[in-house]
Image (spheres, rainbow, N blue to C red):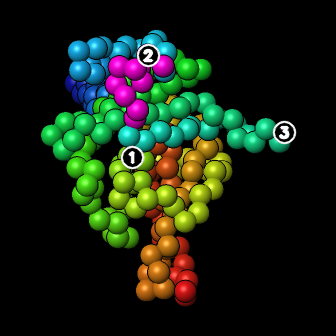
């Protein structure tokens, strides 16, 4: 094998390894989570997790499809545990009442001072828990299908269309409202809307 071919192959392998590392960092998962003296693991029932860890700080649904007779159908129920500013938050994903995945999110926050809610404070990568803690429930919420906008970070991000939640926050007549796009419980992007007079 000549040198240019070998360099090209090494370059391709290096890019592949970097992609795998980024994938692992983007959605770190664990098989278990300690709650006091008890340990919860994937496969546990939601009742057992609640008994061990208490009520989550926030819960949300991940939607999978729409049926005219039933409306939006949930694929997952997501529980968020805010463990404070010195520890990483935990995101637990349930399907059919069983714990399927445990993820770590960014560092937690003090519930009494979660941060400000100004248009510039809304950013991609925020968890749904942090968004609700900062800004409360949105002024309007829409569930819809949207075309994917960026390369997938994990298998569940793929596909030409995904179901997202659009949260609208109106900051008053002096500001453009913000449309916050959430996918799987995380802010994917923030779009600027119009300015409405009150």
Q: Secondary structure at mark 3?
A: loop
In the rendered view, tell whether residue 96 sits above or below residue 72. above
Q: Which residues are magenta?
A: 47-56
Q: Which mark is residue 69?
A: 3
Give the SS element for disc 2.
helix
Q: Tell whether label 3 touches label 2 (CB within 8 Å).
A: no
Determine whether, in the image, residue 71 is placed left or right of residue 155.
right
Q: Position of residue 30 (x, y in %)?
A: 32, 20
User: Can you tell which mark lies on residue 129?
Assistant: 1
Q: Give the number of marks.
A: 3
Q: Is residue 82 left or right of residue 70?
A: left
Q: Can you tell which of label 2 and label 1 is closer to the viewer?
A: 2
What is the spatial separation of the Cα atoms under label 2 and label 1, in whole angstroms? 22 Å
Chief SS of the magenta region = helix
Residue occupying image coordinates x 59% and y 20%? 96
Q: Is residue 51 magenta?
A: yes
Marks 2 and 3, how far apart at CA: 33 Å
Residue of label 2: 48
| Residue 194 visible in the shown view | yes
Residue 112 included in the magenta stretch of the image:
no
Give the percent coordinates (x, y) of residue 61: 55, 38
- Residue 55 place in picture, x, y as percent: 40, 32
Crowd around label 2: few <14 · some 14–19 · many ≥20 (10 Å):
some
Q: 10 Å neighbourhood of mark 3: few (<14), some, or many (≥20)?
A: few
Looking at the figure, which quarter contains the C terminus? bottom right
The mark that comes first in sequence, 2 or 1, is 2
Depicted 125 relative to depicted 2: above or below:
below
Of the image marks 1 and 3, the number of the one nearer the N terminus: 3
Of the pair 157 and 83, the residue shown nearer to us: 83
Secondary structure of residue under mark 1: helix
């Amino acid at each position: 094998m000549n040198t240019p071919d070998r360099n090209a192959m090494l370059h391709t392998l290096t890019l592949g390894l970097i992609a795998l590392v980024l994938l692992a960092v983007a959605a770190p998962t664990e098989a278990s989570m300690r709650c006091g003296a008890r340990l919860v693991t994937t496969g546990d029932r939601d009742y057992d997790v609640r008994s061990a860890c208490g009520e989550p700080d926030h819960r949300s649904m991940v939607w999978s499809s729409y049926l005219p007779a039933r409306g939006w159908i949930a694929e997952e129920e997501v529980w968020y545990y805010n463990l404070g500013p010195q520890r990483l938050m935990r995101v637990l994903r349930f399907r059919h009442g069983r714990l399927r995945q445990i993820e770590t999110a960014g560092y937690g926050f003090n519930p009494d001072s979660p941060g400000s809610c100004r248009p510039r404070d809304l950013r991609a990568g925020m968890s749904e828990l942090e968004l609700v803690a900062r800004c409360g429930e949105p002024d309007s919420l829409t569930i819809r299908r949207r075309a994917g906008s960026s390369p997938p970070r994990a298998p569940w991000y793929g596909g030409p269309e995904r179901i997202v939640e659009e949260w609208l926050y109106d900051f008053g007549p002096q500001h453009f409202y913000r449309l916050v796009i959430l996918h799987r419980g995380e802010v994917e992007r923030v779009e600027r809307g119009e300015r409405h007079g009150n």
